Each structure stands twice: as C-alpha cells, then as structure tokens.
Amino acid sequence: MSSITHRIRNAYVFAGFAVLTWSTVATAFKLTLSLIDIYQTLFYANLVSCITLVAVLAIRGKLRTFVLETRIHWRRSIFTALMNPCLYYVILFAAYDRLPAQVAQPINYSWSMVLVFLSAAVLGQRVSRRDWIAALICYVGVFLIATEGPIDGLASADWFGVGLAMASTLIWAGYWVASIRDPRSTETSLAACFLLALPMTGALCMVLSDFSISVTGLTGAAYIGLFEMSLAFLAWGTALRLTDRTARISNLIFLSPFISLVLIHLVLGEAIHLTTGIGLLLIVVALIFQQRQST
C-alpha cells in the first residue's frame, strides 16, 4: 500500500471516529442531564476536556509552545473561553434540558448557517443570493422541527427552549469568527480556552449548584468532556490534515445528525416525528446547497 493511500485511509478512519462520536452527543447530553444539573455537567466535562487536551499537547511535544503562546494570547483566550465552553454550553445544556433531543440536536446543527451571516456582519464577507435561499430552506426546517409533530402544535411548542437552541448556534458561530484571526493551532487555542475556563465553570458550579455528584453522573460528564469537547475535534482536524480530498471528508459530517436520530430513538426511546425528519433533511440540504456555491 502506498503512503498516499495509507494516509487517505487514515483520514477516513479519523473522520469516521469524529462523525460517530458527534452522533452520540445528543443522547449523552440527555442522559447526563437527567442525572446531574447543567453547571455540574459543564464543570466536570470542562475538567476532563482540559486534562485531555493538555495531555495530547504533551504527547505531541507541544506543551512548551502551548505555555508560551497562552502567555502571549491570554486576553484572546479568556474572551473565547467565555464563549466556549462557558456561555455556549450553559445555553446548549439548558436547551437540551427543556427540549426533546430530536428537537435540540438538529437546531444546533444549523450553526454553520449562522456563521455565514455573522461573518458578513463582523468580517465584511459578502452574502450571496444562494446564501439567502439556503437560509430560508434551513429555517423552514427549524420551524418544522420546533413544532414537535403536528403543525397545529405550535401553541404548545417550547419556544423558549427553541430560542435557547438558536442562541447556542449564534454563540458557537461567534466563537469561530473570533478564532479566525487566532495565529495558534486549533488544538492549542482550544486547550487554552478550556484551561482558562476552569475557574469560570468552577465558580458557576459552586454558586449555582455544588460539586457533589454520583458516579454515573460523573461518567456522563467525563464522556462529554473526553469525546464531544476534545477527541472528536482533534480527530476531525487530523482527518482534514491527512486528506487531499477535503470535500469528500467534509461531506461525511452530514451523516452525523441522521445517525444521532437513530440513537435518540433506540437509547432515549423518543418517537421520531415526521416533521423532525423532514426538518433535518431541509437543514442538511440547505447546508450542502450553500457550501456548493464555490464549486
């Protein structure tokens, strides 16, 4: 096997790991939040993620660089840490705490559409007609998902929960816009965010909750911190670095929300509404339509 073929195969392995990991996130959130509260989940997940990311940097021989760059860019890191993990996950967990997983997960998936318009507002990037059409399709999908079944169920929909899920997409997109001009590698800046966020998430947990949790609750938070917040991002970044077929690798991410719905049904026992499936399909079609404009 040639080195190029081996590298491409490894790229698909890392990408597949990331996709499968992200597919479990909605289920993991709901299970963990049924055992411990938002602030406990955030603190312990933050702690595990911080340990994981710093350990990976140490294994890769980048710990010294991490320390030096964090000293230089500590103001930027504190600002982005306030967004991710602090504000983003507080709002996202609150949305999952109120909504069925099949509602919160697809809405959160629409963050990349928000990124287009936020980049236009902050960075001056142009919004094309194709972007507007994609946004319309995307948010028709969000509307269908929010109904949780019948269209006449609008009055009983948890619009505050939907608003939280939508707000999380804005914060996540804002985090990526703020990170665009960061000269550090993604793994270094992410590790700095989670390290500097620890006192913040610890303070939130101490003031609004407490640190006493069950072993099963800790296991859930550790899973979120290890996989959702850390290894999945590292694996995805590795896959993109290894491949010379970025478009093909990137398209694998569209499998994640559909696999997630299967897990939500099988593990959480949620009956998946027809409107959820149609809405998610519209969101994914909109994202693909928007991304293909440059090809």
Image: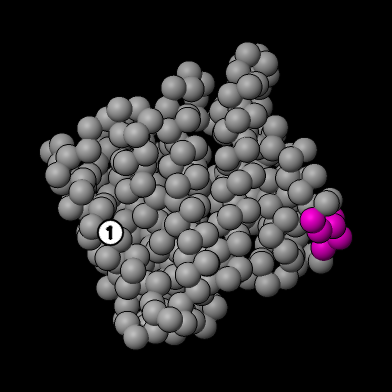
The residue range painted magenta reads: 208-213
Q: Where is residue 10 in the image (x, y as percent from the top left)?
A: 38, 41
Quarter location, residue 143: bottom left
| Residue under the point 52% across and 83% down | 269
Q: Is residue 66 visible?
A: no
Residue for point 27% across, 38% down? 246
Instruction: Tell me, yes or no, whether the highlighted magenta stretch contains residue 209.
Output: yes
Q: Quadrant of residue 221?
A: bottom right
Residue 129 picture location, percent across and down: 14, 44
Few, some or many C-alpha atoms within 10 Å of disc 1 (few <14, some 14-19, many ≥20)?
many
Three-letter code for the amino acid on which mark 1 is drawn: Cys
Q: In this view, does 142 lie to the left or right of 99?
A: left
Which residue is rendered at x = 68% and y = 72% of the image? 34
The answer to whether residue 137 of the structure is visible from this angle is yes
Residue drawn 39% across and 50% down?
111
- Report whether 11 appears left or right of 214: left
Residue 63 or residue 99, whichever sits in front = 99
Magenta span dominant secondary structure: loop
Left or right of 195: which side holds 1?
A: left
Please determine whether, in this image, residue 25 is positioned above or below residue 44.
below
Question: Is 115 one of the magenta-colored residues?
Answer: no
268 versus 19 height, above or below: below
Residue at the limit of the structure toward the front, as seen here = 155
Q: What residue sits right under mark 1 in the picture? A: 138
* 91 over 130 or under it: above or below: below
